[in-house]
Image (cartoon, rainbow, N blue to C red):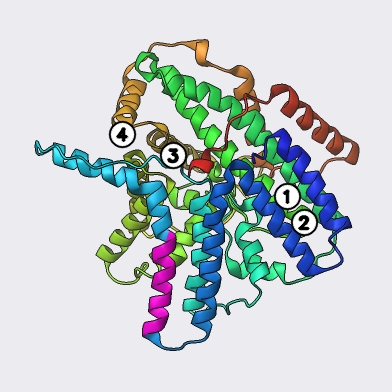
Amino acid sequence: MLFNSLDFGIFLPLVFLLYWFVFNKNLRVQNLFLLIVSYVFYGWWDWRFLSLILFSSVLDFKVGQLLLNTDKHSRRKLLLGISIFVNLGFLGVFKYYNFFADSFVEAFQLFGKDIAVSSLQIILPVGISFYTFQTLSYTIDIYNRKMEPTRDWLSFFAFVSFFPQLVAGPIERASNLLPQFYKKRTFDYHSATDGCRQILWGFFKKMVIADNCATMANQIFDNYEDASGFSLLLGALYFTFQIYGDFSGYSDIAIGTSRLFGFNLMRNFAYPYFSRDIAEFWRRWHISLSTWFRDYLYIPLGGSRGGLKIKLKNTLIIFVVSGFWHGANWTFIVWGFLNALYFLPVMLTNNNRNHMGIVAEGKLFPSLHEFFKISTTFGLTIIAWIFFRSNTVTDAILYIKRMFTTYTYNGADVAKTTLLFVFIMLTVEWLQRDKQYGLEDLKIPKFTRHAVYYVIIACIFYFGGVQQTFIYFQF
């Protein structure tokens, strides 16, 4: 079920009313209701894949119980290995089998050998990368004795399938979200209204920014061979704001929706396009995934401990794996590798933790030095996004080559209204960069504040682009 659909427009208020006015007397009944509606939400797309979520939930709940009952190191490693192997096995078959099969054939063709390897005609289950990592973090934390396994299967199943963040995150840790299912929840008007404002801002970014940018980006990327350098630059800019508006918009809707039901999810975006270097960008972009890889891959590999070679190796692994997580295509791997190259100079000069605070804090405008660093980081990010968006690595390279060598001006690709809304979004988020999201705690008179909300609603209905599926559903 899409957030930006009529189905969800009916689903959400109905679930909200039943949750608070019918099933609010008993915590277990309330959790059972959340579990059922979450399965309905996911099964709306294809009910057959509910079996995967159910199996993953049963597996990791049982592994957690078995880990609790044994201190034998070899048995604990075996149990953890089973969880990792099965979860990543599902992910590998559904998401990566055809990629490896095709790459295997192409590798032999380079040496003049033709071999036949059959591909599987399978559908990628929506959100499998997200809930797989979510359940894996639970068993890994138990194995490392960072948390106790739950005995409440209902709360655990509801945690795994919680519908606001089920298919595109944030990737929640059990240590944060699972305990919230144990506690009685009471309706908080302030939290709910704040959640509605975040939902509204998320819909604005998705429907007005991302969907309109998508139309232009698709048109230019699909015909890049005939486009001018100016149009190609615009296309890269459109996609840059499409993916931000799309994914951060989804996260805002998910976090805001969760607050309507008394839950607090982790922040997933912190205005990444205002970053002063690539290290800061990755602290602010898809935070739940970046911190997941840091805690469950980078640190276990040795992190920054050891010599320079260890740091270089671990950094390269993290970024390449992050790229591969996004999709079974060499374009994503190159995107990850390119970001690693961006990151290395910052790390090698020990400047990767220079910018931990808010840019231009307490000031209206950044300094010239800050503006230059933001612009440089943003420009490097745009180049990387071209690889992310292109169908093949060759397409990406040719796109960039034409963008820098073909100077014909073509104003036909300038979607002025879309760029105006992008400017408005950036202005609002710049002014609110010390807040969690764009509309939080606006310091303007009440009448003006409500007028802003109604104007945004009108813009969504009047200027919302052609409905597009959320980009991260494919991951």
Magenta stretch in the rendered image: 74-87
Query: What amino acid type should be assigned to the residue bearing mark 4?
Result: Val
Residue receiving disc 1: 257
Q: Which mark is residue 261?
A: 2
The image shows residue 129 at horizontal and vertical percentages of 48, 52
Query: What amino acid type should be assigned to the residue bearing mark 2?
Result: Phe
| Secondary-structure class at tag 3 | helix
Give above or below for 275 relative to 351.
above
Residue receiving disc 3: 381
Q: Mark 3 or mark 1, which is nearer the start of the sequence?
A: 1
Q: Nearer the viewer, mark 3 or mark 2?
A: 2
Few, some or many residues within 10 Å of mark 4 (<14, 14–19, 20+): many
Quarter in which the N terminus is drawn = top right
- The answer to whether the residue labelled 1 contacts the one labelled 2, judged by CB atoms less than 8 Å apart, is yes
174 magenta-colored: no
- The answer to whether the residue labelled 3 contacts the one labelled 4, judged by CB atoms less than 8 Å apart, is no
Say left or right for 450 vs 72.
Answer: right
Say left or right for 63 vs 17.
Answer: left
| Secondary-structure class at tag 1 | helix
Q: CA distance from mark 1 to mark 3?
A: 30 Å
Q: Mark 4 or mark 2, which is nearer the start of the sequence?
A: 2
Q: CA distance from mark 3 to mark 4?
A: 16 Å
Question: How would you classify the magenta stretch by its main secondary structure?
Answer: helix
Is residue 288 something that shows in the picture? no
- The answer to whether the residue labelled 2 contacts the one labelled 4, judged by CB atoms less than 8 Å apart, is no
- The answer to whether the residue labelled 4 contacts the one labelled 1, judged by CB atoms less than 8 Å apart, is no
Q: Nearer the viewer, mark 1 or mark 3?
A: 1
Say left or right for 465 vs 321.
Answer: right
Q: CA distance from mark 1 to mark 2?
A: 7 Å
Q: For the point 87% across and 57% down, which residue is it? A: 22
